[in-house]
Image (cartoon, coloured by chain):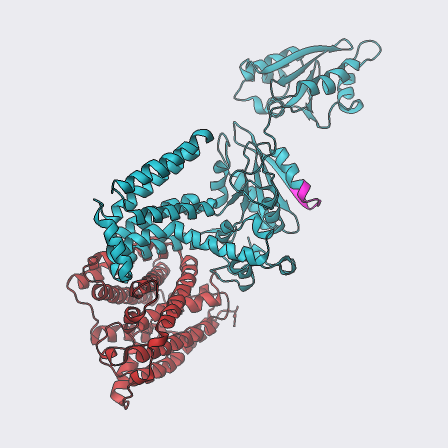
Chain colours: A cyan, B red
């Protein structure tokens, strides 16, 4: 039985194959499975005359930890006379403290999973089990300020690519045993660590179970970013908006867990996902809860206006200028007409072209290295913008409108993909069908958002369905004296269903 | 099954009615005094007319009228389902024609009418496809938009309102009865409610009364503002409430009529989507083997085609015969049938 398993083991069937008792065969199996990959380090040693092998992956395990926590204690192992495999195994598992993390493995699948996670695995001749020690030492980025969700007064720590560091960032902020992390490996090839985080007495059990169920449905080979996981968490509804919130801030993540949400961390990604989420949360930042309520309320309304401007301003301007000029005041109309008189194209076409140019420059600014990214801004602002106006290709009012729109879109970075697409749709529909087209576009957006729900919670709650209590944190920002007393959690919003 | 709240049901029923009120009230060439009396009488009649449906709801809280009819008699049930779908197509047809006319008059040479009604039909189809919850949530936003538009227009017109514009005429019974008939022919909530009540979580009966009360309040408000602002111009104004927008002026913009347009569009598409949805529900109750979205597509195309034929011939208005057909359907499907089924044995789990 055992012989058959050893002979047949290869890179396709290794996962459940049992470890060979013979060290020689086990090493051969490892080499066959890994295809003699150059980063597989196998070091054969003798412990009291008994043959063993220490296996690790180059760059994944720390060499100093290996020397200090594995080799030195192993070399100190000494029994009088010849040591049996049971003596060595007992020493490794019970009589020594080689490292804080220790696992007993029985299959090659487990061996490779632990090796690729930075463990060192000790094989013992004559033993069908091996022992893994956690001595991870791969290079990782240090904790830095979040790049996409900046703030002034809150914490300046952001998630990094290493999931365990991210877990520690969360645990440090929520020192309660009710905070749970359930880890699972997803991706048939990548075996990526995906962690579900929640607070037991706050997150509804139905949501936790559903999130885990959705994660188990993922049948991809690899999980490289959160984008691979997100569609499985979102549900079947096809929408332009995402009902799964992402954040790179541990403080924001903890705040959401405290509100009874379920968080998902993916190894190798400096972002965490939160579900269920609401549309209105795209306008909330951690600074909102640092500043005085009056100022936050004011800024929140600025953000709502910014969203409206980012999506609809160019479209409405095009609609009015081309289809409804009668609603403009006489002076305004004269000024607009004077500036448009010298340009060769229609207001609609100008807006279309300038918006495309803006999107080009924005994309170039993101993709290029930071040093060159600045140059793109200079090219955009000084050369193209100024030259376009002075050569009368584009009217100055339109450039102001697009500039204002671009600035407004920076205020709500979470909704940037949606604002970009809808802005263009609004321009096209406004140009062809005036305010009628704009309203149809808005109606489409409204239905698209309204149809969306996540884990039983309507995406556009608490606005519609309306929940008065929860609207306090939408229209204003109550002080913590009131927020602390309030027990408005998402599953209690009107329209929310228990799952 | 129960998906929408009491408030959302009120909003749906209110918006399904307010389109005509905000488009045509006060009616051109009609006496305002008679209209106001007519609205009050018709609302009182409407309050009585909904009683059978409410009793039916109490007896069968989880089954709509089509399901109740289908369970009693399969063939008759199918007939009722088809009748509901037919009534819904007629209502959508009337709405699209009125909307096309509204756009044709207010924004001439803007877009061809067939594109206007086609666009509304497509967006309504999309909304109906998303289901009752999506429509109800959108209706909440549309209602907010309507109220906001109303407040802005009223505030902008505040200085232009005058009691000297009020013209009082002695009401005649003939005119009042005409207004009552006119208003009752628009009581399409009686088609919506028997199909949608299984979806409401609580207080279904109260929601329809609340919607009627809200409708009456807004009708009074719209009429009052139109009379106080427009005066004798009302006699020649086709769309008095919309015309208020041309009078309304702010320091930012010259006139507000174009800014009122979104309220019309949003309400029109919500009402169209609702009737597409009830037609779909009715037909899928009668013909269970066919996928419900197939019915939705058929209903949408049929309603659009019927409207298109009328719009291309510029046949905008509804004749007395058309109104009578709709009124008979409302009477049979919304009053007589529920009354008949009221006497049957009810379901065990009553909610109210």
Above or below B40: residue A65: above
Q: Quadrant of residue A320?
A: bottom left
Residue A57 shows up from this direction: yes
Q: Position of residue A318 (x, y in %)?
A: 29, 52
The answer to whether residue A174 is magenta is yes
The answer to whether residue B152 is magenta is no
Q: Position of residue A441 (x, y in %)?
A: 33, 53
Q: Residue furthest front?
A: A390
Above or below A291: residue B32: below
Which image quadrant: the N terminus of chain A?
A: top right
- A91 or B124, which is in the foreground? B124
Q: Position of residue B253 (x, y in %)?
A: 32, 63
- B325 or A55, which is in the foreground? A55
Q: Position of residue A404 (x, y in %)?
A: 39, 48
B150 to the left or right of A209: left
Q: Quadrant of residue A487?
A: bottom right
Where are the magenta residues, as a range? A172-180
Please count the marks in the image. Answer: 0
Q: Quadrant of residue B283?
A: bottom left
B173 to the left or right of A308: left
Residue B189 shows up from this direction: no
Q: Residue furthest right?
A: A80
- A76 or A328, which is in the foreground? A328
């Amino acid at each position: 039985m055992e012989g058959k398993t050893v002979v047949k083991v290869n890179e396709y069937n290794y996962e459940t194959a049992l470890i060979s008792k013979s060290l020689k065969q086990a090493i051969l199996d490892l080499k066959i499975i890994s295809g003699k990959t150059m980063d597989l380090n196998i070091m054969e040693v003798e412990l009291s005359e008994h043959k063993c092998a220490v296996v690790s992956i180059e760059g994944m395990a720390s060499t100093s930890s290996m020397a200090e926590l594995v080799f030195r204690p192993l070399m100190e192992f000494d029994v009088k006379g010849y040591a049996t495999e049971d003596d060595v195994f007992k020493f490794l598992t019970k009589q020594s403290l080689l490292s804080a993390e220790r696992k007993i493995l029985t299959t090659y699948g487990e061996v490779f999973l632990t090796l690729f996670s930075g463990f060192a695995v000790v094989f013992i001749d004559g033993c069908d089990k091996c022992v893994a020690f956690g001595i991870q030492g791969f290079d990782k980025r240090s904790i830095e300020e979040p790049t996409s969700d900046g703030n002034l007064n809150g914490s300046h720590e952001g998630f990094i690519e290493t999931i365990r560091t991210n877990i520690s960032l969360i645990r440090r902020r929520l020192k309660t045993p009710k905070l749970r992390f359930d880890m699972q490996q997803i991706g048939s090839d990548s075996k990526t660590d995906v962690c579900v985080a929640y607070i037991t007495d706050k997150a509804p059990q139905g949501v936790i179970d559903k999130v885990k169920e959705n994660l188990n449905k993922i049948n991809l080979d690899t999980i490289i970013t959160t984008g691979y996981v997100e569609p499985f968490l979102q549900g079947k509804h096809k929408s332009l908006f995402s009902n799964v919130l992402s954040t790179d801030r541990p403080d924001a993540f903890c705040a959401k867990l405290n509100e009874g949400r379920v968080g998902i961390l993916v190894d190798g990604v400096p972002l965490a996902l939160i579900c269920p989420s609401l549309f209105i949360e795209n306008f909330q930042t951690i600074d909102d809860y640092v500043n005085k309520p009056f100022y936050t309320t004011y800024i929140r309304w600025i953000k709502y206006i910014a969203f409206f401007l980012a999506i609809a301003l160019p479209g409405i301007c095009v609609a009015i200028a081309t289809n409804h000029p009668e609603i403009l005041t006489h002076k305004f109309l004269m000024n607009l007409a004077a500036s448009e008189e010298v340009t060769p194209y229609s207001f609609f076409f100008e807006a279309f072209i300038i918006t495309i140019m803006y999107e080009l420059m924005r994309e170039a600014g993101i993709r290029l290295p930071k040093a060159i990214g600045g140059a793109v801004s200079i090219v955009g602002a000084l050369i193209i913008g100024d030259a376009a106006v002075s050569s009368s290709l584009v009217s100055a009012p339109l450039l102001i409108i697009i500039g204002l729109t671009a600035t407004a879109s920076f205020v709500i970075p979470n909704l940037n993909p949606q604002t970009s697409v809808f802005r263009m749709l609004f321009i096209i529909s406004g140009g062809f069908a005036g305010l009628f087209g704009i309203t149809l576009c808005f109606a489409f957006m409204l239905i698209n958002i309204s149809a969306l729900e996540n884990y039983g919670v309507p995406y556009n709650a608490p606005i519609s369905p309306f929940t008065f209590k929860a609207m306090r944190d939408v229209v204003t920002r109550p002080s913590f004296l009131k927020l602390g007393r309030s027990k408005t959690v998402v599953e209690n919003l009107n329209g929310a269903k228990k799952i | 099954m129960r998906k929408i709240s009491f408030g959302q049901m009120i909003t749906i029923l209110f918006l399904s009615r307010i389109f005509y009120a905000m488009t045509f009230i006060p009616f051109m060439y009609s006496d305002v005094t008679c209209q106001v009396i007519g609205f009050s009488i018709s609302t009182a009649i409407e309050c009585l007319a909904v009683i059978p449906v409410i009793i039916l709801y109490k007896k069968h809280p989880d089954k709509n009228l089509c399901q109740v009819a289908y369970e009693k008699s399969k063939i008759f049930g199918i007939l009722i389902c088809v009748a509901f779908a037919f009534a819904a197509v007629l209502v959508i047809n009337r709405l699209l024609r009125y909307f096309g006319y509204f756009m044709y008059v207010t924004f001439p040479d803007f877009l061809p009418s067939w594109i206007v009604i086609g666009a509304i039909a497509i967006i309504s189809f999309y909304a109906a496809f998303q289901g009752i919850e999506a429509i109800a949530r959108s209706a909440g936003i549309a209602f907010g938009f309507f109220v906001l538009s109303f407040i802005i227009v009223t505030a902008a017109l505040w200085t232009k309102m005058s009691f000297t514009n009020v013209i009082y005429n002695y009401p005649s019974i003939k005119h009042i009865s005409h207004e009552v008939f006119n208003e009752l022919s628009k009581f399409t909530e009686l088609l919506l409610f028997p199909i949608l009540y299984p979806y409401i979580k609580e207080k279904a009966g109260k929601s329809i009364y609340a919607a009627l009360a809200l409708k009456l309040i807004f009708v009074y408000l719209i009429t009052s503002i139109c009379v106080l602002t427009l005066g004798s111009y009302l006699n020649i104004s086709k769309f008095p409430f919309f015309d208020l927008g041309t009078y309304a002026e702010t320091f930012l913009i010259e006139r507000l009529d174009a800014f009122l347009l979104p309220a019309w569009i949003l309400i029109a598409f919500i009402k169209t989507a609702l009737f597409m949805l009830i037609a779909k529900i009715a037909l899928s109750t009668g013909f269970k083997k066919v996928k419900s979205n197939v019915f939705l597509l058929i209903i949408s195309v049929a309603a659009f085609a019927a409207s298109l034929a009328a719009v291309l011939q510029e046949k905008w208005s509804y004749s007395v015969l058309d109104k009578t057909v709709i009124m008979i359907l409302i009477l049979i499907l919304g009053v007589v049938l529920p009354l008949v089924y009221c006497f049957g044995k009810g379901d065990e789990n009553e909610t109210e």
